[in-house]
Each structure stands twice: as structure tokens, then as C-alpha cells.
Image (spheres, rainbow, N blue to C red):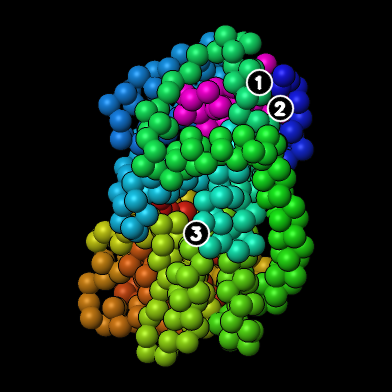
Amino acid sequence: MLDAGAVADRLLALAPRAAGYTVALSGGRDSVALLHALAAARRLPAPLTALHIDHGLHPEAARWAEHCHRLCADLGVPLAYRRVAVHDTAGEGLEGAARSARYRAFSEHLAPGCCLVLAHHAEDQAETLLLRALRGGGLHGLSAMPPVRPLGRGRLARPLLAVSRASLTAYAQAHALAWVEDPANRDQRHDRVYLRRRVLPALTHRWPGAASEMAAGAAALQADRALLAEYLDADLAASRAGDGRPAVAYLRGLSERRRHAVVRRWLEVSGCRPPPRRQLEAGVQALLEAGTDRNPELTWADGCIRRYRGHLHLLPSAAPEPEGPPGRWVWYGGQALALPTGTLMADWSPGPGVAPGLAASGLAVCFRAGLETAAARRRAQRLFQGIGVPPWLRGARPLLCHGERPVAVAGYGAARRVQASPGLRVRWAPSQSSSS
């Protein structure tokens, strides 16, 4: 039978130095068994917490959340609860849209350096491999679910991919654990449920170790994919500018297959799930080949890529930073300045920055909406262009003004006439509600 210590050891092999471990707790058997095992082992070097996502799609959702609260209270594990809105705006179907909403919530919840722990097991891996094979997946798709990958500001780990469903059931029963059953897991209209209830049992009847063998096959493909990633990382490093954004000119010099693979790798190392293969290929072609007078973009459920000044920019899938409101504030370059959509800060930079004496005399701070004259708006436009502020951020980033003349943009830089070395590097931290 599955051993709690072995589960903790598997997790530590994947994420040994995480700042914290958060189990995605649905209330079902698999996540309940995973949380119980990690809590019982007491081997983790950082705090253990749980996160329950309520999709708002089932009338029993409140009961499931209450079950998770009781379990966590019994185990002494802090539980966070998040309600998400599920909208099928990308044509994924309800199941796909719920998954996208869930993973966005995971990413937003995860603190820097922390690890989200999922309870996917060997049969889940086999189902994923079969689904992706039926959808024409290549090496990336047939690798199925990786045991560990970046996610948001931390990482995601799946320590149970080599563990069978039967082992998890035996563990849960041996420890008298209670769990909830989602009726959707019996609805064979869902592809994954059909595979689970009809196809995998038939395969297992003919080949008793089918699920384990498919999971092992996915692991072998992941090893091949990791080798390919080493080569792609070299291309990605060569393509990136100082700010880490891939250069369009470099990507154009690669073969089509190679450029697609490099962009996919860029998304992966950025913690963003890439779009489906055909959408990625068509989107990359538009981003690289569209004329300079065009503004191409590739948008999917998990992100958006735009092109600006010869580089690709990765944006979150959620709404962009909102435009700042009208109004003016005064900043003297010392303490942080709280604004309606974020916080303005500064630190010393050995390179060019705002001259400290100029800041000490007081600078006006406003957003584009707060510029009162046509002349000020024209000057702001020239400043945006001069220091390379992307168009989609120009209304959201604070402007620092000397009198009525905009001289710097938080997070981007300052006009040369107000620079000094060393100087003040002006930073911008959007509030969570405005950046999520």
C-alpha cells in the first residue's frame, strides 16, 4: 500500500527547496489522500497548505467546500478558498474553460518560490496520453503531464504520476478518509470520462499493466523532450534581448519548425501553458511576418503575445492593467507613493536614472488621463515612443512631470535631459486587483 513517507519523498525529489507547498484540494479521493499523506509524513521543510477552487458549476459546490474545510481543520492544514468564473470564450468547451479558469487561479494564488501540488496519478496520465494521441499530438502532447513545471511565480509538481488509482483508493480506505464524488466523473459525454470508464478497462483487461506502461511511455517521451529543450534553450538565449523578450529578426532566421519550438519553449519557461499547435503556428507566422504598420497578436485562454519594436511581449490572459484615473500627486523621490492602481517606488541605480536633486524638489505624478493640455499629451507621446513604452501600457503607467512637461515613465525610464548617473530608478508595482 502507498506510504505517506514515500509520497513526501516523491514531492521533495521534484521540489526540494520550495518556500511552501500547496495541495490543490478538490475534495475528491485523490487530492484527499495526497493531502493526508503529506500532512501525516511531516517531512516537508516548508509550510503545507491547501487551496480549494469553486467553479460555481454544481449545486453541491458549497457542500464540497465545507468538506474541504472540515478535512483541513482535522489535519491542522490552512485552507484557502477561491471562487472562479467559468466562461467559454476560447471555444474550449465547458470542461476546458473550467480547467483554464482553475489554472489561472492556481497561478495567481501561488506565492513566489512556492509549489502547487496536484494529485494526478498513473491512470490520469494514461488518459491524457490517449486524449492527446487522438488529437494528433506530437512529442509535446504525447509527453502528457510533466511531473514538474513552472507555474506563475513558483512551480507545479505531480508526485503521484507513477502511483495507481487502486493504491490511492487503498490508502484512503485504510485511513478511513471521507471524500466527495463529482457526478461529472460519471458522465461519459466527457472524453476523459469515456476513456476512464470504457476504453481503459478494456485495455487493462487485455494488457493488465496498460495504465502503468502508458505512464512509463510518457515519462520516456518527457526525457526526450528534456533533451530537445536543452537545444531550444540555446536558441532562446540567443534570441532574447536584454529584457528577456525574443527578437523577431532572430526568429525569422530560423526554420518554421524551429521558430515554433523556440516560442513554445519561451512560453513554457515563462510558466505559461502554450496554445494548441495549429493556433501557435498560425499566430507565430502572423507575429513574425505582418508588416510594420500592423499590430498582430496571438491570444488564447492562458496568455497573449504581442509584437512591439521588433520583440515579442507575453501578456497575461486576464484584462490588461487598467488606465490610471485623472488627478495629480506630488512625489519627492523618497518614500513609496500609493496611487489608485498601484504603488510608485524608487531605488538607486548605478546607471542612468532620474536626477536625485530634481526628484527632491518635487515632481508631479499623473497618468495619461490626467494630462490637461494638448501640448502635454504630445510630449507624453514623444516620451513614450522615445523610451519604448508599449502602446497597451501607456495609459496604465504613471508619468513623472517637471512642471507641465512629462519627463519619466515609471518602470521604463526617463528623458535624457533629467537623467543622472547614478540616479533614481523609478519602479511601478500594480495593485493585485489591477494586474490580475
- Between disc 3 and disc 2, the foreground one is 3
35 is within the stretch colored magenta? yes
Q: CA distance from mark 1 to mark 2?
A: 7 Å
SS of the residue at dot 2?
A: helix
Residue 17 seen in render: no
Q: Residue at point 39% right, 18% down?
A: 66
Q: Which residue is mark 2?
A: 7
Q: CA distance from mark 1 to mark 3?
A: 35 Å
Q: Quadrant of residue 419?
A: bottom right
Q: Nearer the viewer, residue 175 or 77?
A: 175
152 shown above or below 120: below
Which three-letter amino acid code belongs to the residue tagged 2? Val
Q: CA distance from mark 3 to mark 2?
A: 32 Å
Mark 1–mark 2 contact, CB under 8 Å? yes
Q: Residue at point 36% right, 42% down?
A: 189
Q: Nearer the viewer, residue 275 or 403?
A: 275
Q: Which residue is mark 3?
A: 135
Which three-letter amino acid code belongs to the residue tagged 1? Ala
SS of the residue at dot 1?
A: helix
Q: Along the horizontal axis of the image, is 171 left or right of 367? A: right
Q: Which residue is mark 1?
A: 37
Magenta span of residues: 23-50
324 shown above or below 287: above
- Between disc 1 and disc 3, the foreground one is 3
Mark 3–mark 2 contact, CB under 8 Å? no
Precedes in sequence: disc 3 or disc 2: 2
Q: Position of residue 387 (x, y in %)?
A: 48, 79
Q: Position of residue 123 (x, y in %)?
A: 60, 37
